[in-house]
Image (tube, rainbow, N blue to C red):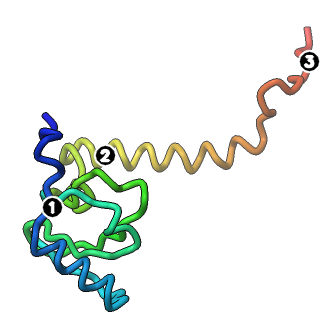
Amino acid sequence: MSRSLKKGPFTDVKLMAKVTRAKEKNDRKAIKTWARASTITPEMVGMSFEVHNGKNFLKVFVEENMVGHKLGEFSPTRKFIAHGGKMAKEQSKTAAGASSTASTSSASTPARGAAAPAKKK
């Protein structure tokens, strides 16, 4: 559910103060913040932030197409490793082995749409 238009977008007051101060000084140094819920405004475009993800700070460079999104959207809090355990590892090994053999055998097979050699009767 989005925020009311009457209230306007949420931006942390201290963060906006840091942004305006950096704009005045023309400072390119990354602004460190914990305010993941802050909405990205047009004033922030071209600046870099270090957004806290719960463990460490991830660097986020704000571009024009990010305006309207939250800072936290660009600093994931969870790290995906892989699904499954022993069985998934075996499947990935066989898939990797099959793809390497397929790449070598695909050079000898004709491309799609190409005329196949005629069969002898």
Q: How many marks can you see?
A: 3
Residue 84 % position (x, y)? 19, 43
Q: Quadrant of the N terminus?
A: top left
Query: Going 36% across and 56% down the picture, which residue do you hit?
Result: 66
> In this orientation, does residue 6 appear?
yes
Q: Tell me the element at label 3.
A: loop
Q: Residue at x 21, y 56 (%)?
A: 39
Whether residue 28 sits left or right of residue 51 in the image: it is right
Residues 113 and 68: in front is 68
Disc 1 designates what residue? 11
Q: Is residue 7 above or below residue 70?
A: above
User: The C terminus appears in which quarter of the rendering?
Assistant: top right
In three-dimensional space, the C-alpha distance between marks 1 and 3, rounded to whole angstroms, equals 71 Å
User: Quick one: label 1 or label 2, which is nearer the N terminus?
Assistant: 1
Give residue 5's position: percent from left, percent from top: 17, 40
Check contact, mark 3 vs mark 2: CB within 8 A: no
Q: Of label 3 and label 2, which has the lower sequence position?
A: 2
Is 41 situated above or below 46? above
Give the residue type that dot 3 points to: Ala
Figure quadrant of residue 94: top left
- Whether residue 76 sits left or right of residue 104 in the image: it is left
Farthest top residue? 121
Residue at mark 2: 90
Q: Disc 1 or 3, which lies upstream in sequence?
A: 1
Instruction: Specify the quadrant of the image occupied by residue 49.
Output: bottom left
Q: Amino acid at mark 1?
A: Thr
Residue for badge 3 = 118
Q: Position of residue 18 (x, y in %)?
A: 19, 80
Distance from the alpha carbon under mark 1 to that under mark 2: 48 Å
Q: Is residue 79 visible?
A: no
Kind of residue sitting beneath label 2: Glu
Q: Which mark's residue is nearer the viewer, 1 or 3?
A: 1
